[in-house]
Image (tube, helix red, strand yellow):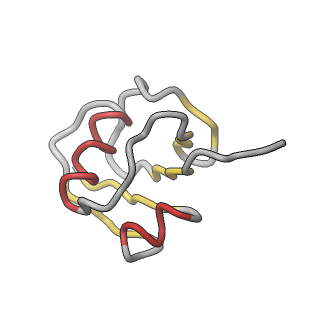
Amino acid sequence: MKIQVRYFALFREQAGCDAETVNWSGGTAADLFQTMAAKHPTLQTQAAALVAINDEMSSWETRLHEDDEVLFFPPVAGG
């Protein structure tokens, strides 16, 4: 299946691109992040990161579908 992946902030720097389209065998958002981390070894762990699917904040356990757009947001520090 074809998935559009977008990276924000530090993840964009670590992946070396803003977005990419990937052909992927399917699974959850967490599975996709692990696949992308294998492709871009500098991507930090997903711990405390956020994911949105088709512009809606989502769970890492959400199953993905053909033509979904997945947005990865790195952990945010605040105070």
Residue 18 vertical position relative to residue 5 in the rendered view, above or below: below
Q: Residue furthest right?
A: 79
Left or right: residue 55 versus residue 31 is right
Q: In which quadrant will I find the C terminus?
A: top right
Q: Residue furthest left?
A: 25
Foreground residue among 64 and 10: 10
What residue is shown at x 31% (from left), y 62% (from top)?
42
What residue is shown at x 24% (from left), y 59% (from top)?
41
Horizontal and vertical percent for residue 78?
A: 78, 44
Left or right: residue 52 versus residue 67 is right
Residue 15 vertical position relative to residue 57 in the rendered view, above or below: below
Horizontal and vertical percent for residue 71?
A: 51, 52
Horizontal and vertical percent for residue 24?
A: 19, 49
Q: How many marks?
A: 0
Asked where in the image residue 31 lies, by quadrant, the reply is: top left
Horizontal and vertical percent for residue 17?
A: 41, 76
Foreground residue among 62 and 66: 62
What residue is shown at x 22% (from left), y 37% (from top)?
26
Q: Residue furthest front?
A: 79
